[in-house]
Amino acid sequence: MAFAIGPYCVEKPVILAPMAGVTDLPFRRLCHDQGAGLVVSEMVTSDVRLWNSTKSRHRLVHDHEVSPRSVQIAGGDPQMMAEAARQNVALGAQIIDINMGCPAKKVCNKAAGSALLKDESLVRDILETVVNSVSVPVTLKIRTGWSQEEKNAMTIAKMAEDIGIQALAIHGRTRECKFQGNVEYDTIAEVKQAIQIPVFANGDIKDAKTARFVKDYTQADGIMIGRAAQGKPWIFNEINHYLQTNELLDPPSLAEVKALVIKHVHNLHQFYGDYLGVRIARKHVGWYLQTLADNTQFRSVFNRIDNTQEQLDQLEEFFARQ
């Protein structure tokens, strides 16, 4: 099930999708440990003048990163995108991923993300300029099109392959759909048949059985997991196991979940420092509690804690009560 992106062999076909505010370095490392074959960084703006912000500085850290290091950039200006690609490579990126899939208004309003799908000549300019600006592989993430009436994933996919894009991830919705309505995998299957580079299927893949269905249906080389990994990073192991054996893996024990959550929170504290680390940990712990179907008041208690050690102590107590 392995596939190649340029010189890099990806052994496991389950990929962590880039998610702003989620796929930071601690979470990428965790998902890799839990079976993700490739992890992609949070989206970084192509405007390098904005890289001095606290948010961007954290997104540009690739120390102790798992290889290959894939960094996603977003923007609508070919030269700025190329400069962002070059600077990320200088900072240690081994793969540059171009975002043409994000439906968020603040991204689309700047003629970036999936808004670019409306302008195929601009897409060509960006892809050519970025591919020619760096020596590392460049990959692309798109949606099926701008709207139901304007599905141009096939055109973009063929163009991308011709220009030298090394792999393509497709979310099975249009920009218009955002994250609503049913995802469709027919377009992904059609694109996979038409191009030679690796294709990754993305959208509403929530568990191992769905992953198996989508992989078989589309014949995609990889399955890209986004929101389903929030609070459940062991989903990568579950999918890998099911793809290999056709048997469902037993869920992790409470003791294993406890160890994973506490280590994750500790790593967030270390990476972001006390002030930010505490706040970012609240979000991730909230997702873990949803996965654990926790109906107690613990989440509201945890969200009021301002101290790193107290967060860890309260988690110990919470799991002791389960």
Image (tube, rainbow, N blue to C red):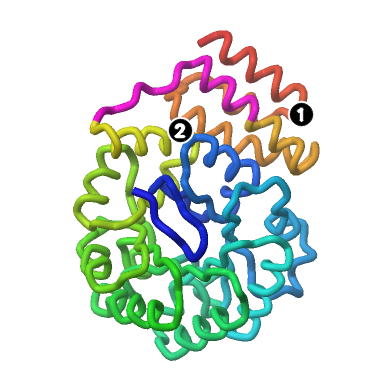
- Residue 318 placed where, x, y %? 59, 15
Identify residue type, mark 1: Thr
Identify residue type, mark 2: Trp
What is the quadrant of residue 237 in the picture?
top left
Depicted 194 relative to depicted 268: above or below:
below
- Residue 176 placed where, x, y %? 35, 69
Depicted 200 relative to depicted 213: above or below:
below
Q: Residue furthest front?
A: 7
Q: Which residues are magenta?
A: 247-263
Judge by depth and name the residue closer to the eye, 88 or 115. 88
Task: Please count the marks in the image.
Answer: 2
The residue lying at 44 percent from left, 72 percent from top is 114
Judge by depth and name the residue closer to the eye, 221 or 280. 221
The residue lying at 57 percent from left, 49 percent from top is 23
Mark 2 crowd level (few <14, some 14–19, many ≥20, 10 Å Cα):
many
Q: Does 258 lie within the magenta span?
A: yes
- Residue 160 placed where, x, y %? 40, 78
* Residue under pointer 1: 308
Can residue 64 be seen?
yes
The Cα atoms of the two marked residues, 1 and 2, are separated by 24 Å
* Residue under pointer 2: 234
- Precedes in sequence: disc 1 or disc 2: 2
Can residue 106 be seen?
no
Query: Mark 1 falls on what kind of element?
Result: helix
Query: Mark 2 falls on what kind of element?
Result: loop
- Residue 199 placed where, x, y %? 35, 62
Depicted 316 relative to depicted 173: above or below:
above
31 sits to left or right of 45: left
The residue lying at 63 percent from left, 35 percent from top is 282
